[in-house]
Image (cartoon, helix red, strand yellow):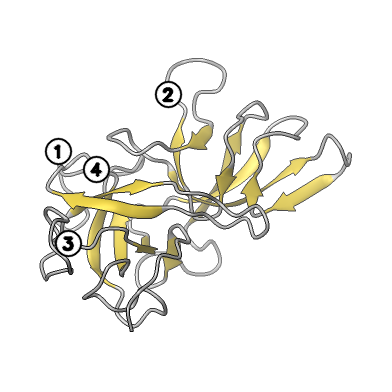
Amino acid sequence: MANTAAYYGFLQYFGGAGGAPTFAQSTRRIASSASTAIYTGDPVTPVAGTGAATGYIVSAANGAQPIAGIFVGCKYLSTALNRTVWSPYWPGSGATGDVEAYVIDDPNARFVVQTSFAGAPMTGSATTMTSGIQGQYATFALGSGNTSTGRSGAYLNAVSTTVTSPFIVVDYAIGFGNGGDPTTQYCNVIVGFNNEQWRTNGAGPASINA
């Protein structure tokens, strides 16, 4: 059956690191002034520089900057409700004080994610996927998150040999629901971190498959 586009972000895959009790998660902070929404399954990046917000996280833009991990929820003191709110996404406003965020950041974590491209692993120019995508570096797009479920709309949008890309493809996720057909567009793949805050990418000592 042909795959369909139904992006869900980066879903933790337990074939890599990430078991009880921590599930490869760490606690990070989001500034209450951070106005861009962040959804469960979105990549996040550390705030750079030397200011007061250094080390906090924000929604990641696709590119060569290190990512801090994958966002999986948060809690914060709601200004409107005057009580602590647990949420699968950060709406971009409404918190009094810092937001406590949960991020999967183990350097060896793995994720299942849907792809948007249909073509050969290097170019995306053919009509179907071909073998050899494993070991390729990958970039992403955030897409549109779902405010009802808090789920990400992120997906992989390209693979290449660019060693500063944020992810690296480990394998196809064959049979993994919609997207489980590796021969058609919108297939699911398993990825690991490449350019992540707690590891170095292929431009440095080694990528995740070295």
The residue labelled by disc 4 is 165
Q: At 16% from the left edge and 64% from the top edge, which residue is drawn?
A: 134
Mark 1 in CB contact with mark 2 (< 8 angstroms): no
The residues tagged by marks 4 and 1 sit, at their Cα atoms, a distance apart of 10 Å
Mark 4 in CB contact with mark 3 (< 8 angstroms): no
The residue labelled by disc 1 is 203
The residues tagged by marks 4 and 3 sit, at their Cα atoms, a distance apart of 19 Å
How many other residues sit within 10 Å of disc 4, few (<14), some (14-19) or many (≥20)?
many
Mark 4 in CB contact with mark 1 (< 8 angstroms): no
Q: Where's residue 129, x and y in %?
A: 17, 68
- Earlier along the polypeptide chain: callout 1 or callout 2? 2
Mark 3 element type: loop
The residue labelled by disc 2 is 48
Q: Where's residue 165, x and y in %?
A: 24, 43
Q: Nearer the viewer, mark 3 or mark 2?
A: 3
Q: Quadrant of residue 203?
A: top left
- Earlier along the polypeptide chain: callout 3 or callout 1? 3
Three-letter amino acid code at disc 1? Ala
The residue labelled by disc 3 is 119
